[in-house]
Image (cartoon, rainbow, N blue to C red):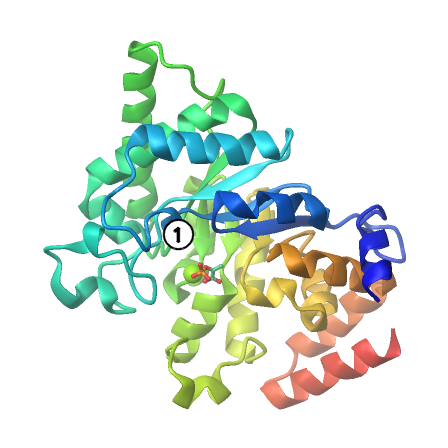
């Protein structure tokens, strides 16, 4: 099985009926880049930059952030790198960034993600500067976490424009064109206003982990309710479908980067719903590609249609598992 997986790396990521699916990696730290290279990922769909701030007492300065990002961008050899701004808060702690905000940042509903970055714009400016400089070494995109209103996107764009002007004035080498700014769709309000967000975002990345948590009101870290955590709940699937359709209407790219994207079980459903770009832990890419190569897209689309008519998560799971058992 291992030999078959390592052969997978060289095979194209296409469905049985010939539709190409982009497979990107989720990355947390620069030291993972060797694994990413081995995985066959053609880009990074989610760089969780907060991990470069966690488990340390200080805050990395612009040069340190730049060097880490530059190394990652250079290692991708021209492959697209999607850099998410700090997603501290909730289950991801970094006390040196949240001192003075009390318990709010530890709460799933508190000052976290883009909210924290906008409350501490100096940190966001530094991160934008590091990203812009790394963008001189290869294509990058910027992704904003935990967006819940369109104002957050506008505000982040204004800050980015200010940083671009400052770096240009100082003749610092940066990305030739300003990187696209995308939005994580991982809060129900973002999903339900995806049509409006698509006007101000350049792309979407669906975060099914948090979208499931917030839609079902289930703390993703609480084991006592873990049995209720289900991305196949029709409410979650409908929000995903609504968001992807809004992206297509606005002709904006949309990918999915939650854990469900890396699980071969969900592959046919995601492809059937229209996803052509999946981002996952590097270790999952071989297995997911293997699954993609067995799927006939036309059949997956028909099955997804049947699934989206269901009102019961158990029935959805059955319809999906039956499909997976056939092909
Ligand atoms: C998600 O919420 O699905 C996601 C990809 O972000 P994270 O897991 O880092 O919260
Ligand atoms: Mg998330």
Q: Residue at x 54, y 62 (%)?
A: 258
Q: Label 1 CB, ligand 1: below 8 Å?
A: no
Question: Taking 199 as reference, is 39 left or right?
Answer: right
Q: Is residue 52 above or below residue 267?
A: above
**Which residue is tagged 1?**
51
Residue 133 in percent (x, y) is at 42, 24
Helix, strand or loop for disc 1? helix
| View extreme (left): residue | 100
Q: Residue at x 35, y 9 (%)?
A: 171
Q: Quadrant of the C terminus?
A: bottom right
Q: Quadrant of residue 1?
A: bottom right
Q: x and y percent of residue 165 in the render?
A: 30, 18
Tell me if residue 108 comes above or below residue 116 in the rendering. Answer: below
Image spot of residue 34 (x, y percent)? 62, 44
- Please identify the quarter of the rendering in which residue 312 is found: bottom right
Examine the rendered structure and indicate whether residue 250 appears above or below residue 259. Answer: above
Q: Viewer-proximal residue, 137 or 200?
A: 137
* Residue plotted at (60% across, 33% down): 75
Q: Nearer the viewer, residue 315 or 83?
A: 83
Q: Is residue 162 left or right of residue 18?
A: left
Image coordinates of residue 51 in percent, x first then y, are 39, 52
- Using the rendered view, name the quadrant where residue 103 is placed: bottom left
């Amino acid at each position: 099985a291992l030999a078959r997986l390592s052969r997978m790396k060289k095979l194209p990521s296409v469905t049985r009926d010939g539709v190409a699916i982009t497979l990107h990696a989720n990355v947390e730290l620069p030291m993972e880049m060797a694994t990413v290279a081995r995985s066959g990922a053609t880009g990074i769909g989610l760089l969780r930059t907060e991990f470069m701030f966690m488990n340390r007492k200080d805050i990395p300065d612009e040069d340190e952030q730049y060097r880490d990002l530059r190394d990652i961008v250079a290692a991708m050899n021209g492959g697209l790198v999607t850099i998410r701004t700090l997603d501290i808060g909730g289950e991801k702690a970094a006390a040196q960034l949240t001192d003075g905000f009390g318990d709010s940042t530890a709460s799933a509903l508190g000052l976290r993600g883009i909210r924290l970055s906008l409350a501490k714009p100096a940190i966001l400016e530094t991160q934008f500067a590091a990203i812009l400089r790394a963008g001189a070494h290869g294509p990058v995109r910027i992704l904003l976490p935990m967006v819940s209103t369109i104002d957050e996107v506008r505000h982040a764009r204004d800050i980015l424009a200010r940083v671009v002007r400052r770096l240009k004035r100082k003749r610092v080498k940066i990305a030739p064109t300003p990187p696209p700014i995308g939005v994580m769709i991982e809060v129900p309000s973002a999903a339900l206003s995806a049509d409006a967000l698509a006007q101000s975002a350049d792309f979407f990345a669906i975060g099914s982990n948090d979208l499931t948590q917030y839609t079902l009101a289930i703390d993703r870290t609480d084991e006592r309710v873990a049995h209720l955590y289900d991305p196949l709940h029709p409410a979650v699937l409908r929000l995903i479908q609504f968001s992807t359709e809004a992206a297509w209407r606005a002709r904006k790219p949309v990918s999915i980067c939650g854990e469900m994207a890396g699980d071969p079980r969900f592959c046919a459903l995601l492809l059937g719903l229209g996803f052509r770009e999946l981002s996952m832990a590097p270790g999952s890419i071989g297995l997911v590609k293997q699954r993609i190569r067995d799927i006939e897209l036309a059949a997956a689309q028909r099955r997804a249609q049947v699934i989206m008519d269901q009102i019961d998560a158990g029935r959805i799971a059955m319809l999906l598992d039956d499909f997976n058992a056939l092909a």
